Image (tube, rainbow, N blue to C red):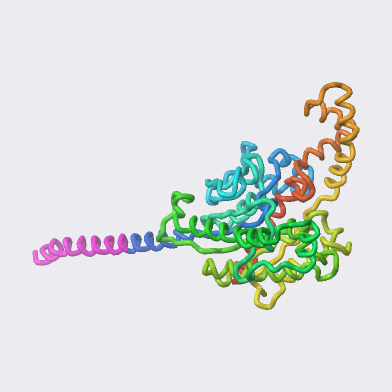
Amino acid sequence: MKKDQTTKENKPMKNIKTSTRWMMIAAVVGLMSGICSQASAKPLKVFILAGQSNMQGHVNVSTFDSMAGDPKTAPLLKEMRDADGKPHLCDKVWISSIGCLDDDTTKQTGKLTAGFGASTQEIGPEFTFGITMEKLGDPILIIKTSWGGKDLHTAFRPPSAGPYVWSDFELARRKERGDDMGKEKTDKIQAAGLYYRLMIGHVKKVLGDIKRVVPDYDPKQGYELAGFVWFQGFNDLVSDWTYDKGNEPGGYELYATLLAHFIRDVRKDLSAPKLPFVIGVMGIGGEKEDSKPGNQMYFRQAQVAAAELPEFKGNVAVVRTAAYWVDELETLQNRMEACWPKVDARVAAEKDTSWENKMKVMAENFTPEEWTRLKGVSNGGYHYLGAARIMAPIGKAFAEANLMMIKQK
């Protein structure tokens, strides 16, 4: 009987122990769940893309098809399109872009896809940059600030570079032209650094209200400034009054100095002293320009020289965009340009100057295969021919260079 009583009395104790054990397991599971939740809420990685018209992007989406026939770009094209054949919509990459549409202050925001270029039918390097970064699995925000036709010596002039310095050569040319130097100097003071300030201002504005761009952003997860890409240079390349010795070795040394100031000032103003920085080196005309003494060669050397300063070792990288130029497209484009006088004369004689008729007549100057390849061009050479075959790999290369520095950090 005593044994039975002991048994009966022990059953509740056993249940209590069992219940307590399950409560402990539940608590541990809950704790682990909380830890996992915190771990999954990774900081938002923020990348800043800045520059002039080629950062804006003048590549029409109609040129995407041309990538399919090139073994080098066909795999990337598959990433640029979703299953329905439409431009890929990134699920974890958001973008805030300023300066591409209409005027200097027009903004676009949303999940990254095609259409964040110079128009809603165009892309710049941001598209494949974001697609490549998306593979990280982290939430990503791209802040893009780009304005066409802007130079580093004035428009993007960094604060630490000081005021614009007028060279004797430029002063002499302006005197010959009869310019009002009082007005010119006042205008230059107002213009110097204007777009640098717009760029920094926009970045800080976005970072101050991230949820406006990334609706799911939780301030508790925070953000990390993970990279800066600079793709600019054409207007400095052709500024032959500022760089009057540009066609001589070292003729763009001033640009290298300004770019070093730019990197330092960006990092200072954004409180990111080791912010990974990628320089997109001028690539118009391809690698053949690297062996032709002249402005292009010396300008490219200046861009690379800035990155090679000891203070920038391991935290500034260059991407030589000339490696992605397509000579074949340039040749076809040049042939097309040479044909225009003949085509214009023909359509005028036919009294049908519609675009459709011009293209019909133009096509007669090319084989069917050449004409198909020409559809991969949508702009001039200074805009990398508006070709997806060129710009898409450049955007990917920018991302890969940035990722390499992140891994090294």
Q: Residue at x 50, y 60 (%)?
A: 204
Would you place residue 177 above or below residue 404 in this image? above
Residue 190 % position (x, y): 60, 60
- Residue 376 appears anywhere in the view: yes
- Where residue 297 sits, quadrant-wise, is bottom right
**Furthest residue in direction top, as rendered:** 351
Would you place residue 161 above or below residue 176 in this image? below
Residue 401 % position (x, y): 67, 63
Q: Could you tell me how many numbered marks the image carries? A: 0
**Furthest residue in direction bottom, as rendered:** 310
- Where residue 241 sits, quadrant-wise, is bottom right
- Residue 243 appears anywhere in the view: no
Residue 166 % position (x, y): 72, 67
In reply to whether residue 24 is colored magenta, the answer given is: yes
Q: Residue at x 78, y 69 (%)?
A: 168
Viewed as shown, does residue 124 lie left or right of 250? left
Quadrant assignment for the N terminus: bottom left
Would you place residue 256 above or below residue 229 in this image? below
Q: Main secondary structure of the magenta part?
A: helix
Viewed as shown, does residue 31 lie left or right of 89? left
Residue 79 % position (x, y): 65, 47
In reply to whether residue 343 is colored magenta, the answer given is: no
Q: Residue at x 89, y 35 (%)?
A: 341
Quadrant assignment for the C terminus: bottom right
Q: Nearer the viewer, residue 287 or 69?
A: 287
Q: Nearer the viewer, residue 256 or 394?
A: 256
Q: Nearer the viewer, residue 24 or 405?
A: 405
Q: Nearer the viewer, residue 371 or 350?
A: 350
Magenta residues (range):
1-27
